[in-house]
């Protein structure tokens, strides 16, 4: 993927395009394509101090200056109140993800390139500079440090330690006693200390989100060295141990190879999606694996991990990672539930989701289908699947229990247990206490998959019991949820029997999950309504535009955004459920429809987070992207549909 000066020198366009490179620990490097930080989350060394959480922005950015031909070119780009300074973007000529992010500036008849790389499984960032042109220019690199939790912002303060130490050739910075040391190494460079504060950086995306958006950054000094044409030099930054013996060129070459292998080789949308999937698989603790829900601000969530896993791991052939992730969550089963969230600050996991454990069972079923690995399921997962189903039947936290008719009910006052969980202050935006439609579909599928797992585990009695309960669920579901008048399913049936027929996409799971609840004639009517009112070129709306509560834009401060989050905002991950349903009902014609939709969707990979998929989009056209720039279940479900339907991007078919 390549951008030219037409985009890079137009700051209004360049500032909307971001890149992300992750380290497999929860840390990452990220900025816009011209190096203008527009978020508090941007940084070159964002390190997970307790992988995959405890993330800190240590090295916010590097501002580069090149002196050549008697002139001094400031190549950084920063926004301050009422000004952009310096204006390095005016010298930018290209940006590439190949697969590492590389920005090239043109100066005095020559070019300077800068490539950023996070080293996999290490809290290390490397930055490679290469000058091609006449003369021997002098490069000055100014590190700008934030040294704070990645959700916070820094202000100038007297507590910063201005000094720098030398240790075995490393420049060691400890601006705050309670933070990890930052080690810098740039062979051949002279360090000139000055200990300056740079005040009032403005982060435009934070301002748009209604949050604090100004920050002060501390610079300990400048690294200075002469460049030779055609020769790369490297800066290494680490939140870990000594850098002696670290070969940045070798590490960057290894990371390039790793990413190309992750992409499956070649160029285009499918390799980009496969590489995007790689960003979410991270270490949890010393040996576990998990899936980060999204970048920049999400940690690992149970529901998100289980929905994303088939696309992130199984569609990419990463069955080892799938086994590790399923095992990690399975060992946390408690009273039939798995954690929905591991807090970013550490501490006990939170069990506050009705569907995360059911999604785990569905993921187990998809793992079995993809790998045929009944031995692993029998040895490592069968007991957890049984504990989930038994826990739900017995009744567990937050009013989760099985009614006499076999349907699953849930909820407590003021608590949101489904994926539509937004609140504005004490107000629940989408109250769904009772029997949500997708929970019944998940419960039905979990019972039938559980029966299959029980047969694998040589427990035929248990298998018959769960299959019989599933039959009762199906019969009760059709009576309670179908409306001949509306021609689609209720989104919710309350415990008193009152049905909410707001047209939402949640009913797609009754058609698209492996075990279908609806006969074909009714499925056709559901798909007609969903396609007409909810389907967009970038995903599905969460509410019909004809509903009085519909919100067509996801924008503004936290309250405004939360009010729109599930009230019309488009979620691309829901395309997975939609096209599962379409292909099940229409067969090959449904696959063709999915491929045509993917051809149009692929353009999104060149906006917002480059090469990845955003969390949400506006419900109204032109469907501007919003939320996190890279969301695991967005990437996973789009990738799963692409692989399942045999999609080859239009560019690849030329």
Image (tube, rainbow, N blue to C red):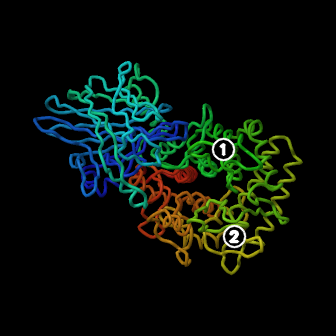
Q: CA distance from mark 2 to mark 1?
A: 31 Å
Q: How would you rate the neighbour count of disc 2 (Cα within 10 Å): few for under 14, some for 14-19, many for 20 or more?
A: many
Residue 100 seen from this side: no
Q: Secondary structure at mark 2?
A: strand
The structure residue drawn at horizontal position 27% and vertical position 45%, both measured from the top left corner, is 94
Residue 499, image x, y percentages: 71, 75
Q: Which residue is mark 2?
A: 492
Out of 33 and 175, give the one closest to the viewer.
175
Q: Is residue 242 above or below residue 104?
A: above
Extreme residue toward the right, this view: 461
Extreme residue toward the left, this view: 70
Q: Secondary structure at mark 1?
A: loop
Q: Please identify, in this view, whether the residue under mark 2 or under mark 1 is nearer the observer.
A: 1
Q: Which residue is mark 1?
A: 348
The structure residue drawn at horizontal position 77% and vertical position 74%, both measured from the top left corner, is 496
Residue 93, image x, y percentages: 24, 46
């Amino acid at each position: 993927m390549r951008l030219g000066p037409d985009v890079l020198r137009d700051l209004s366009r360049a500032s909307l395009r971001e890149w992300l490179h992750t380290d497999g620990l929860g840390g990452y490097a990220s900025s816009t394509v011209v190096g203008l930080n527009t978020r508090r989350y941007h940084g070159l060394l964002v390190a997970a101090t307790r992988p995959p959480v405890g993330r800190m922005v240590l090295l916010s950015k590097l501002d580069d200056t090149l002196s050549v031909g008697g002139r001094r070119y400031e190549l950084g780009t920063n926004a301050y109140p009422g000004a952009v300074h310096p204006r390095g973007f005016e010298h930018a000529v290209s940006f590439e993800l190949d697969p590492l992010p590389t920005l090239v500036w043109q100066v005095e008849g020559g070019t300077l390139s800068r490539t950023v790389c996070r080293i996999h499984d290490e809290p290390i960032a490397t930055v490679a500079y290469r000058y091609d042109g006449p003369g021997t220019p002098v490069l000055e690199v100014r590190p700008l440090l934030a040294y704070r939790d990645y959700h916070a912002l820094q202000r100038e303060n007297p507590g910063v330690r201005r000094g720098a130490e030398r240790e075995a050739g490393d420049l060691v910075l400890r601006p705050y006693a309670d933070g990890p040391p930052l080690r810098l190494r740039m062979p051949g460079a002279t360090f000139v200390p000055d200990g300056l504060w740079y005040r009032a950086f403005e982060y435009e995306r934070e301002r748009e989100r209604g949050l604090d958006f100004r920050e002060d950054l501390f610079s300990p000094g400048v690294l200075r060295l002469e460049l030779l044409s055609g020769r790369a030099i490297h800066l290494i930054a680490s939140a870990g141990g000594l850098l002696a013996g670290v070969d940045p060129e070798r590490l960057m070459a290894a990371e390039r190879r790793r990413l190309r292998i992750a992409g499956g080789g070649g160029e285009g949308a499918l390799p980009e999606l496969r590489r995007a999937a790689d960003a979410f698989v991270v270490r949890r603790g010393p040996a576990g694996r998990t899936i980060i829900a999204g970048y920049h601000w999400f940690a690992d969530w149970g529901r998100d991990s289980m929905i994303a896993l088939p696309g992130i791991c199984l569609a990419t052939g990463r069955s080892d990672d799938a086994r590790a992730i399923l095992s990690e969550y399975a060992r946390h089963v408690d009273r039939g539930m798995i954690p929905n969230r591991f807090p970013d600050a550490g501490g006990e996991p939170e069990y506050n989701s009705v569907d995360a454990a059911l999604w785990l069972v569905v993921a187990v079923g998809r793992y079995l289908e993809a790998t045929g690995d009944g031995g692993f399921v029998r040895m490592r997962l069968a007991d957890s699947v049984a504990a989930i189903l038994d826990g739900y039947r017995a009744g567990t936290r937050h009013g989760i229990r099985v009614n006499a008719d076999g349907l699953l009910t849930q909820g407590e006052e003021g608590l949101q247990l489904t994926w539509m969980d937004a609140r504005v202050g004490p107000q629940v935006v989408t109250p769904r206490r009772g029997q949500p439609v997708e929970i019944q579909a998940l419960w039905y599928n979990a019972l039938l998959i559980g029966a299959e797992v029980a047969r694998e585990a040589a427990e035929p009695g248990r298998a018959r019991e769960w299959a019989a309960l599933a039959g009762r669920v199906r019969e009760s579901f059709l009576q309670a949820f179908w409306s001949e008048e509306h021609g689609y399913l209720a989104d919710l049936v309350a415990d008193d029997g009152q049905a909410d027929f707001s047209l939402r996409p949640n009913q797609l799971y009754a058609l698209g999950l492996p075990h279908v609840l609806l006969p074909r004639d009714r499925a056709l009517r559901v798909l007609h309504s969903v396609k007409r009112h909810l389907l967009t070129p970038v995903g599905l709306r969460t509410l019909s535009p004809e509903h009085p509560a519909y919100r067509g834009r996801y924008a503004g401060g936290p309250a405004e955004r939360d009010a729109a989050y599930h009230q019309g905002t488009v979620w691309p991950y829901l395309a997975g459920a939609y096209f599962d349903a379409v292909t099940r009902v229409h067969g090959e014609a449904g696959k063709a429809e999915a491929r045509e939709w993917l051809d149009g969707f692929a353009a999104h990979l060149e906006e917002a987070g480059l090469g990845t998929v955003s969390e949400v989009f506006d419900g109204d056209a032109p469907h501007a992207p919003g939320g996190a720039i890279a969301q695991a279940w967005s990437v996973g479900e789009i990738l799963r549909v692409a692989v399942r339907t045999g999609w080859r991007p239009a560019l690849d078919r030329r």
